[in-house]
Amino acid sequence: LETDNSLDNDEKSTVPNYRKDIVETIESRISKKIEPMELFDYVYGMLNYPVYINKFKEFLKVDFPRIPYPKNLDEYNRISEIGGKLRKLHVMENSSDWPVSVGYPITGSDLVEKIEYRDYRLYINDNQFFDNIPENVFNYFIGGYQPAQKWLKDRKGQKLTFEDIRHYQEIIYSLSETNKIIEAFK
């Protein structure tokens, strides 16, 4: 999908930019008219599908991904549904409604001086830490990045605001849920 950035329109909107022949091929394979966001979710789901990633690991390093056509409607629906869940997590859609499972129990300077993980705690200085962070979430990779680590490293030497702390808790929730979805996707 492509964002319409025209100067005449203050509203954000998206315009499908899929090749018509590809959309028609998919529609004929699954015997269903497809919506643009649903197709985006299929592609996003496929790009996060562990079997796909492992099969095309080397190819993905040097070229654009090639997305296989769905075999049938069930496969298309399953992958689109998973892709939709992942998309919503990764863009943090409705994140203010997400539960907070990560604590930040100690008051202090809120200054990010170090990033040290031990025993489900992620220390940002000698006294303050985020609590209840699973190690697999702290070390989770998306592409070549470890978002739980990178976000804090980018703020080293800075004081976290209340909004920063809440956002980091949302990042951890997003990564935790992503990990659960990907594990079930295998």
Image (spheres, helix red, strand yellow):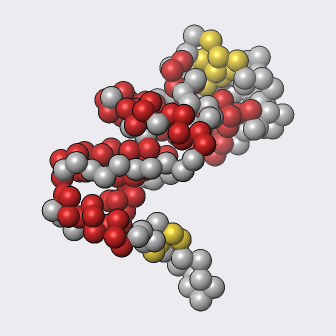
Residue drawn at 56 percent across, 30 percent down: 141
Tell me: 55 left or right of 25.
right
Q: Quadrant of the C terminus?
A: top left
Question: Which of 39/155 is in front?
Answer: 39
Residue drawn at 70 percent across, 18 percent down: 116
Q: Name above or below for residue 126 compared with residue 33.
A: above
Q: Name above or below for residue 127 compared with residue 167.
A: above
Tell me: 77 left or right of 51.
left
Residue drawn at 44 percent across, 50 percent down: 66
Tell me: 10 left or right of 74.
right
Total count of labels = 0
Residue drawn at 59 percent across, 77 percent down: 5
In percent of width and height, residue 139 lies at 58, 23
Q: Picture quarter containing residue 124? A: top right
> Which residue extends farthest right?
157
The answer, for residue 164, to whether it is visible in the render is: yes
Q: Name above or below for residue 111 compared with residue 32.
A: above
The answer, for residue 173, to whether it is visible in the render is: no
In percent of width and height, residue 15 lies at 45, 74
In percent of width and height, residue 59 lies at 53, 39
> Which residue extends farthest left?
31
Question: Which of 154/111 is in front?
Answer: 154
> Which residue extends farthest top?
119
